[in-house]
Amino acid sequence: DVLRAHLVSASSREVVDAVGVEATPGSYAVQYVARLQETYAVQVLLGTSLRTSTLWVSAAESCASTSYATGVALSVATAGYSATFTIQARDAFNNTETQPATSYRLYLVQQDPNPAATAAAAASSSSS
């Protein structure tokens, strides 16, 4: 018998086809890739027998290229006072991260207020 499986998302109706390969007699290894964070109905068909269950797919690890930060404190802050902004963590498939255990390390880098003067000073010191 051929094992067929489909995952159907509850809200977007995305259909994910799963491939079943017989690992040992009567035992199948099924592989699929679901890209949306949501609930799926899993439909497994073996011969004429249909089995349905529910699956929750959560977001993958955070991805820097799809995550973003918002807030005034990204562009303006006052020395000696707390400044706050928000990071919206998303995975590579643009799903919002829901796991609270993620931590981020942020670095503040001072920008040169006069980059042209700094470049000119560096050029003159390297030519001497």
Image (cartoon, helix red, strand yellow):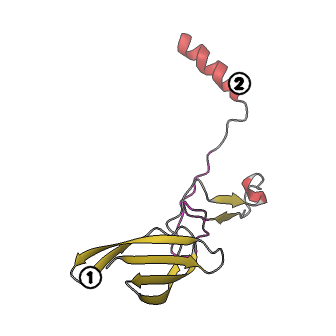
Whole-percent x and y of residue 48? 41, 87
Is residue 128 in view from this perspective?
no
State the SS at label 2: helix
Is residue 77 in view from this perspective?
yes
Whole-percent x and y of residue 32? 43, 70
Classify 10 Å Cα crowding around label 1: few (below 14), some (14-19), many (20 and above): few
Q: Amino acid at mark 1?
A: Ser
Q: Nearer the viewer, residue 81 or 15?
A: 15
Residue contact at pointers 2 and 1, CB within 8 angstroms: no
Q: Looking at the picture, does residue 67 appear above or below residue 33?
A: above
**In the image, what residue occupies the spot 62% across and 81% down?**
10
| Rendering quarter of residue 104 | bottom right
Whole-percent x and y of residue 26? 25, 84
Q: State left or right for residue 22 relative to residue 6.
A: left
* Label disc, if present, on residue 89 of the rendered structure: none
Residue topped by disc 2: 116
**In the image, what residue occupies the spot 61% across and 57% down?**
66
Q: Amino acid at mark 2?
A: Ala
Magenta part of the chain: 89-109
Whole-percent x and y of residue 93? 57, 62
Residue topped by disc 1: 27
